[in-house]
Image (tube, rainbow, N blue to C red):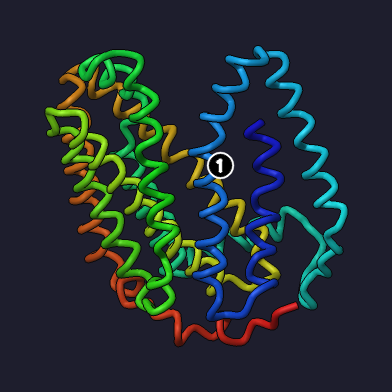
Amino acid sequence: MTGLDALQRPSLDALLPRLVEHDELPAAGALSSLRTNMGMIAGPALGGVLVATLGLAGTYGIDVATFIFSLLALRLMRAVPPPPDAERPSLRRIVEGLQYARSRPELMGTYLVDMVAMFFGMPMALFPAIASIYGGPSILGLLYAAPAVGSFLATATSGWTGHVHRHGQAVLIAAGAWGLAITGFGLSRVLPLALLFLALAGGADMISGLFRMTIWNQTIPDSLRGRLAGIELVSYASGPTLGNVEAGAVATVFGVRTSVVSGGVLCVLGTALLAFALPLFWRYDGRSHGVAVSRPVL
């Protein structure tokens, strides 16, 4: 399933900047994230109701049937022509995409910040152990849902992001806020406070994601967009996975709370170091980037 998503997601990510104006990119990214968060909150709840009423086979049957609607919607989409300067896919073009990413500090900043935040501050693998501290399996669903709720609220109130132009600063500040919220989650001793910090972490992560998406949409030429979206997918997919491995390994040696708190602290410190190491990323201003301003919209 992840392999198929790797074929689909770069194409979808590459399409968005060709459909909206430059100044509408933050709002379009927010709408895309809003859709995802609504699915993450409502989907598991609806799935649970269907399993309880129709059984597992019936639930999967409904899930398969919903893809008919998706295919019909896809059929209604017209083909998007390639950019005028596009070339046929090749290994050489993949290498060019990697070289372009390395040459752009603003792009490298988005990848590195996300990797640091997810590697050190991703404790979701520990949620079952944490749920046992607060009362058992009935708490586990709340722990998983809390970040999605925070992400949803951040997206639903994200109109202010269109007035922010120093996107690199916004990414770094939001990543630091994620680390602080994870630290607070690890230090919490009562469930409501723990859920609040998880929701704050989810909101900070979503704000960081919105501005990272805006930087990608504003700085990558259309001819390279698919390849750079693939690089972003590697960062997006590997960071949380490695972070869960790190959280589990530290928890095995030092305990669950120590793993969560230390991860949050290291996330904050790592983000601060990146802010000093990547001054061009810190100073990035979306109003003055040539690729962003000059891109034609279909």
- Residue 15: x percent and y percent? 69, 63
- Residue at horizontal 64%, vertical 82%? 295
Q: Which residue is mark 1?
A: 39
Q: Is 53 on the left-hand or right-hand side of 143?
A: right
Q: Quadrant of residue 279?
A: bottom left
Horizontal side of residue 287 vs 31, given as left or right:
left
User: What is the tally of numbered marks visible in this picture?
Assistant: 1
Q: Nearer the viewer, residue 57 or 176?
A: 57
Residue at 78%, 57% in the rendered image: 89
Residue in view at x 61 percent, y 51 percent: 230
Mark 1 is on which residue type? Gly
Q: Is residue 263 above or below residue 24?
A: above
Above/below status of 57 relative to 6: above
Residue 22 percent location from the top left of the image = 57, 80
In this orientation, which residue lies closer to the viewer: 265 or 187?
A: 187
Within 10 Å of disc 1 (Cα), the crowding (few <14, some 14-19, many 20+) is some
Question: Left or right: 124 with respect to 81?
Answer: left
The residue nearer to you, when weighing 42 against 249, is 42
Q: Quadrant of the C terminus?
A: bottom right
Q: Position of residue 237 (x, y in %)?
A: 51, 40
Query: What is the quadrant of the N terminus in the image?
Result: top right
* Residue 58: x %, y % from top left: 72, 17
Where residue 234 sits, quadrant-wise, is top right
Farthest residue, direction front: 53
What residue is shown at x 38% (from left), y 59% (from top)?
A: 207
Against 73, residue 288 (above or below) is: below
Q: Element at badge 1?
A: helix
Residue 186, picture quadrant: top left
**Where 36 falls versus 164 (above or below)?**
above
